[in-house]
């Protein structure tokens, strides 16, 4: 198995995870469309369950006006890889330094995994926002259904996202947030970020 296969497992993890449902589920009328996606920095645990097989990892997530960055780590803190998207496209870098590039996250996901992950939309769903211009419905239990995914968002006592659970047939993705707040850094591009961490 090529070393980069660990990154897709964890990116596929960008998505599930660990324990029981936490926080209080957001009300059905809380899903909005008429707002821009805010900048944020977050960290937590994630995982994916694909046809009964699970993968788990930790994540650091940065979303600014210029880019979106996911750093994926093992539970012990070792780097698994990095996914970065800016105006020039998207790139994934494995722990051994191998780089994969594509125009969109959907294209990169298909290239590495053989199927699409909703990476391009998770930042909106994490903030209680629907993807603008895309059909949707609110399920009786309050979850959002959009773009083939059923999305549950649970909030902590401060109204911040605590759990984001996304599922479709055969695939369940869950993020549990330990931290979610304003960004402390604002790299200009994925290349700038690479230079800073090289």
Image: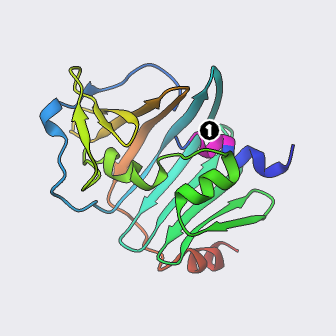
In the image, residue 141 sits, relative to residue 163, either above or below, namely above
In the rendered image, which residue does mark 1 sit on? 57
Dot 1: few (<14), some (14–19), or many (≥20) neighbours within 10 Å?
Answer: many
Quarter of image, res 144? top left
Looking at the image, the residue that sits furthest to the left is 29
In the image, residue 18 sits, relative to residue 128, either above or below, namely above
In the image, residue 17 sits, relative to residue 107, either above or below, namely above
Magenta highlight range: 9-13
Quarter the N terminus occupies: top right
Q: Position of residue 145 (x, y in %)?
A: 31, 34
Task: Report if residue 24 is visible in the image.
Answer: yes
Q: Give the prevailing secondary structure in the magenta stretch.
A: helix
Quarter the C terminus occupies: bottom right
At x 61%, y 77%, the residue is 196
Q: Position of residue 157 (x, y in %)?
A: 22, 32
The verdict on residue 11 being magenta is yes
State left or right for residue 144 relative to residue 95.
Answer: left
As rendered, which of 185 and 112 lies closer to the eye?
112
């Amino acid at each position: 198995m090529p070393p980069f296969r660990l990154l897709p497992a964890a990116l596929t993890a960008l998505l599930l995870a660990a324990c029981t449902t936490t926080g209080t589920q957001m009300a059905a009328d809380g899903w909005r469309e008429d707002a821009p996606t805010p900048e944020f920095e977050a960290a937590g645990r994630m995982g994916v369950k694909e046809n009964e097989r699970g993968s788990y990892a930790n994540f650091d997530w940065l979303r600014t006006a210029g880019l979106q960055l996911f750093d994926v780590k093992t539970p012990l803190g070792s780097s698994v890889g990095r996914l970065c998207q800016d105006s020039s496209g998207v790139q994934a870098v494995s722990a051994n330094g191998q780089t994969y590039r594509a125009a969109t996250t959907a294209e990169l996901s298909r290239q590495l995994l053989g199927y699409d992950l909703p990476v391009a939309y998770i930042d909106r769903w994490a903030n209680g926002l629907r993807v603008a211009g895309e059909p949707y419905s609110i399920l009786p239990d309050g979850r959002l259904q959009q773009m083939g995914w059923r999305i549950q968002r649970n909030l902590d006592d401060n109204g911040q996202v605590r759990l984001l659970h996304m599922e479709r047939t055969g695939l369940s993705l869950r993020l549990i947030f330990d931290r979610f707040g304003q960004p402390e850094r604002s790299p200009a591009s994925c290349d700038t970020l690479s230079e800073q961490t090289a």
